[in-house]
Image (cartoon, rainbow, N blue to C red):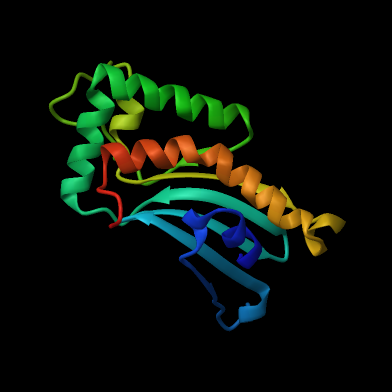
Amino acid sequence: MNVVADADPEYEDFAVWGYGDVLLQAWQRQNAIVRLARNIELGVRFDLDGLEVGVAWWYAPSAQIERYRAAVADPGSGSRLVAIVRGLEREGFVVSGDLLKRPLRGYPADHPRAKLLRHRSVIAARPLGCEEWIHTPTAADRVLAAFSQLRPLASWLIKNVSRPRV
């Protein structure tokens, strides 16, 4: 993460931690995040399966969820989000999150962005693998490349859902 932070000042403020339980030792799983705005984070997870990179908007207060839904419903910003999500999926990212089970009240069930309206959080993640490059400086390059791919979603979330950090 120091190499990643040196490459872009946006990533200077990061946190790294490990966690474990009875079955998993702390050294078996490490996480690092760069908080871009309130409840919006770029992250790296390293475990025995290798590296995984993602962006997450989660644990949001109700005001953020309301702003998110208004932006999704808006024809301009909502269409932009659809394009961003489709682009990430084409790049191999899985877009998920906490979803309501039913269509959102106040919106038609056949709304063109009905699934996105049901989100209470948004996570886009992709494994990078665990080949020999993981032990070289190439690992930082791959994380930076994935962060670059995730920036449009992170920027959309910052602009439409949260206020940028000061």
Which residue is painted at 61% across and 27% down in the image?
A: 90
Q: Is the C terminus in the top left, top right, bottom left or bottom right quadrant?
A: bottom left
As rendered, which of 138 and 125 lies closer to the eye? 138
Q: Position of residue 103 (x, y in %)?
A: 25, 29
Q: Report whether 67 appears left or right of 122.
A: left
Q: Position of residue 91 (x, y in %)?
A: 63, 31
Numbered circles on residues, count:
0
Look at the image and tell me whether residue 103 can be seen.
Answer: no
As rendered, which of 68 and 36 lies closer to the eye? 36
Q: Position of residue 140 (x, y in %)?
A: 69, 56
As rendered, which of 166 and 52 lies closer to the eye? 166
Q: Report whether 113 appears left or right of 128.
A: left
Which residue is painted at 63% across and 53% down in the image?
A: 52
Above or below 66: residue 3:
below
Which residue is painted at 57% across and 41% down in the image?
A: 148
Q: Position of residue 45 (x, y in %)?
A: 60, 61
Which residue is painted at 62% across and 44% down in the image?
A: 146
**Residue that sits furthest to the right in the current view:** 132
Look at the image and tell me whether residue 45 can be seen.
Answer: yes
Q: Is the N terminus in the top left, top right, bottom left or bottom right quadrant?
A: bottom right
